[in-house]
Image (cartoon, rainbow, N blue to C red):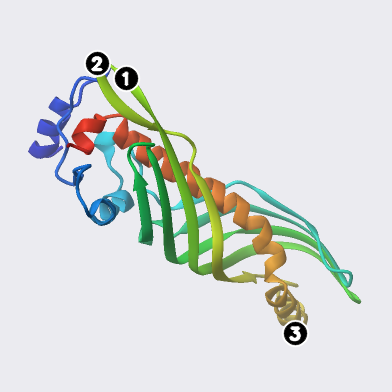
Amino acid sequence: MGIMRVIFMMFLVIDGILAIIPPYIKVCKRTDPNLSKCIIDSIEYLRPKLKEGIPELNLPSIEPLPLNEIKLRSGPNQAQINANITHLIVHGPSSFKILDLKPDLAKTRFLVQFTIPTLYFKGDYDIDMNVLILKYKGQGPLTGNFTNYVFNCLLKADKVTRNNKTYLQFRNFTLTLVTGKSYLHLGNLFGSNDAVLGKATNAFVADNTDLFIDEIKPVLERSLAVKFTNIANSITAMFPFDELFPV
């Protein structure tokens, strides 16, 4: 453990006693006429640390991001698809960029729009598919990506008092995906027995990617919302509101 971290840890004490704000957290005066830009710049300055993780704040790396098991039970008239997607891991959340931020410190509300240029994901699938005259049941690896996904996020916080100091405590973020492109590939279709059918089936999957993505999106939204809520609360629980946003 480096000397700077030792010094920093000496100042972090439990039960709300004032902690020294580390240099990677940039404070913004609440009277700043460009408060929105200041907060965006502060988040951007902190972003590389989120990829590494911040042990002194008990924050693990923001990625890879595991997603819960996803079940697909739907399909168009000409196709019925039952699929389970497991062990889904997402890389790339730390590349997020803030597009717009509207702070309301009086109401402790923040409206944020951000984009993630590319999210890569991989996992395993177990599928039972009936497409026209083609029937297929099997397992294999699943890979894909989300490109230029844009999210709207509403952050609401309550002011709580500990040891005569006021802290922000964020409620669960409300996060909604509004746009983006996606690609999905199912590996090992038909194994090595029929490469032609495997290629044709993947072409069908590519044409109907939305069936899978519509199931993945809500899980991705919830997982990102939980991750970002935990990050925000790990910081605001340690440092009083008046220290993060001085007059």
Residues marked 2 and 1 touching at CB (< 8 Å) = yes
Q: To which residue does mark 1 refer? A: 161
Compared with 148, 55 (above or below) is: above
Q: Is residue 85 visible?
A: yes
Q: Secondary structure at mark 1?
A: strand
Q: Residue 81's image quarter?
A: bottom right
Marks 3,2: beta carbons within 8 A: no
Q: Position of residue 143 (x, y in %)?
A: 57, 66
Query: Residue type at mark 3?
Result: Val
* Residue 7, placed above or below residue 226: above
Q: Residues within 10 Å of mark 2 (few under 14, many from 20)?
A: few
Task: Name which residue lies at 30% across and 36% down.
Answer: 235
| Amino acid carrying mark 2 in the image | Asn
Label pair 3/1, CB-CB below 8 angstroms? no
Q: Position of residue 20 (x, y in %)?
A: 14, 32
Between residues 38 and 55, which one lies in front from this camera angle? Answer: 38
Q: Quadrant of the C terminus?
A: top left
Q: Quadrant of residue 55?
A: top left
Relative to residue 167, is residue 154 drawn left or right?
right
Q: Position of residue 109 (x, y in %)?
A: 40, 41
Q: Residues within 10 Å of mark 3 (few under 14, many from 20)?
A: few
Q: Which mark is residue 164?
A: 2
**Quadrant of residue 142 within the rendered picture:** bottom right
Q: Amino acid at mark 1?
A: Thr
Q: Which mark is residue 104?
A: none
Question: Who is closer to the viewer here, 207 or 194?
Answer: 207
Relative to residue 109, is residue 189 drawn left or right? right
Residue denoted by label 3: 196
Question: Mark 3 or 1, which is nearer the eye?
Answer: 1
Of labels 3 and 2, earlier in sequence is: 2
Q: Earlier in the sequence, mark 3 or mark 1?
A: 1
